[in-house]
Each structure stands twice: as structure tokens, then as C-alpha cells.
Image (cartoon, helix red, strand yellow):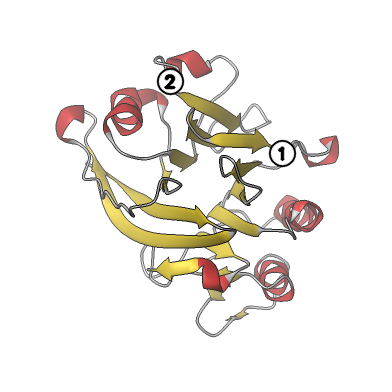
Amino acid sequence: MLVLLLCCLVLVIYHHQILLLILFLSLLMSLRSPSQSLTCLFTHINNPLSCNCCLLNARSVVNKLPELHYLLYFSNYDIILITEFWLHAGITNGLLDPDNKFTVMRCDRPSTNCGGGVCAFVRNSLQVTPVNFDNKYADLELLCFDRVANNSYTSVRFFLTYRAPSSCDYARDYIHLLIECLKRYHYTCYTSIIIGDLNLPKIDWFKLSCIGDLLHKPILDFVIDYGFTQIVQFPTRGPNIFDVVLVDNVHAVLNI
């Protein structure tokens, strides 16, 4: 059995007010029995603009396509966010979503090394606008899109990111570039949400403290300076919090 973290977010956008219902659970995936592999959480708020969203770390999706298709077509999620997708240009979107029911946005690892990458599936009934980054950020495993409420100017900007667990000089340069990109494209008009796996276990999100290195401290400083709040408040891998759901409007959180 492969244990994946699943984050379920319910976004309710109503009269320019955004409510987020954040729930977490363990999603068990069996590679041999996809029909019995998923333990899903369904949440609902009686509002036509509600949006169900889940986050999971896949560590390769190619060998889990039946599970992915189950999640796409037999669950009630409108937005599915996946880190460590492990894809490359040879894997087409048609293979991932053969029924063509979702807008597929992906950022494959730009190097020849396997692993990494992020991908977002947004149901076609939702209005979504991809945000294109400057070419200087092409090496980041990061994608961005705006979820715009139908017949409304209200929107939410999503950042989905993954950072490989490394502490070398390249990792420090990567963190610097990631923060620069987030600062540049941070949405100041409406809510921004940064979701993913930063592999920074030495940040204490309760005390807002960390070791004074060139990886953890710059990220924590950015989170504090730009008014983000980490709403994952329990360990997601061992005793540490690796995964983040950072929001810049704490009043947008309805429940956890």
C-alpha cells in the first residue's frame, strides 16, 4: 500500500467573500486493486459557487493511472493538485484525462532527471486562467492559475509548487528564485494560496521560527513579510510538516 497525503479544500466564493474549508486525511492507494484503493472525503456547502479541491503527493502517476482516473471521474473534486507527478513530454494530457473533462496544467521537471513536477486538473465547468511566468523562472517546479468565479470579478490565485529535498548551493539559488517569483506574481487584489511540498521540515510554523540557514529562513521571512499563514498544523511526514497551504487572508478560512 502506498500512503499519499490528501488535502481537501472547499472554496466558497460569494459576493467577493472567499471561504475555505480545509480538511486533511490519508489516502491509501493500492496499485493492484484501484477500485478499492481510494478513501475519499467529500465535503459540500450548499452554494452554487462552491469548489472542492484536493492536494496529494503522488511520487509518479504513470503507474497509478487507474487511481488517477477514479479520482477525476468518480470523486466530487473540481480541482486536483498533484506534486511529484514524475512526468515528461512523452506523457500526453490525453493519457491523463482521456475523457477530456478537465483543464490540465502541468509543470514537468525541466531537467532530464526523473521525478518532481507539479500538475493541476480543473474541471471544465470552472473558469480558470493560467498565469505564465517569465522565462527566467523556467527552472522552477511551479505553476500558477486564477480561479475566477462565474459571472463575478472574484478570483483566487493558486500557486502549486514542489521543491526537491536538497541543501546544496543549487538549492539555495532555487529558493531565492522561487521567492522572487512568488513576490512578483503574488495577487494583491484577491486571495493568494501557495500549496505544495517545500521539503523544509525545520520551520516551526507554530512559533514562526526556524534554523538560520539559507533555505528555511528566507521562506519563513517571505511568509511573514507578505502576510501568509500556514494552515497545515499537524505533521504530514513523520514528525515534521513538509506540506504547506499558505493563505494571505486568514479570514478566508472557514474551518480546519
Q: Is residue 178 above or below residue 138?
A: below
The answer to whether one can see residue 35 in this image is yes
The N terminus lies in quadrant: top left
Residue 188 disc label: none
The residue that mark 2 highlights is: 97
Report the side of 113 relative to 225 (left or right).
Answer: left
Report the side of 36 relative to 123 (left or right).
Answer: left
Q: Amino acid at mark 1?
A: Val
The C terminus lies in quadrant: bottom left
What secondary structure is found at the residue carrying circle 2? Answer: loop
Residue 167 x, y percent position in the rendering: 65, 58
Residue occupying image coordinates x 50% and y 81%? 206
Residue 27 x, y percent position in the rendering: 27, 47
Residue 19 x, y percent position in the rendering: 48, 62
Residue occupying image coordinates x 63% and y 59%? 191
Circle 2 packing at 10 Å, graded few (<14), some (14-19), many (20+), is some
Q: Is residue 167 above or below residue 91?
A: below
**The one of 12 and 143 positioned closer to us in this rendering:** 12
Residues under labels 1 and 2: Cα distance? Answer: 21 Å
Q: Amino acid at mark 2?
A: Asp
Q: Quadrant of residue 39?
A: top left
Report the side of 140 relative to 78 (left or right).
Answer: right
Residue occupying image coordinates x 58% and y 64%? 247
**The one of 204 and 128 positioned closer to us in this rendering:** 128
Q: Quadrant of residue 138?
A: top right
Residue occupying image coordinates x 49% and y 27%? 124
Circle 1 packing at 10 Å, graded few (<14), some (14-19), many (20+), is some
The residue that mark 1 highlights is: 131
The answer to whether one can see residue 197 in this image is no
What secondary structure is found at the residue carrying circle 1? Answer: loop
Sooner in the amino-acid sequence: mark 1 or mark 2: 2
Residue 67 x, y percent position in the rendering: 29, 30
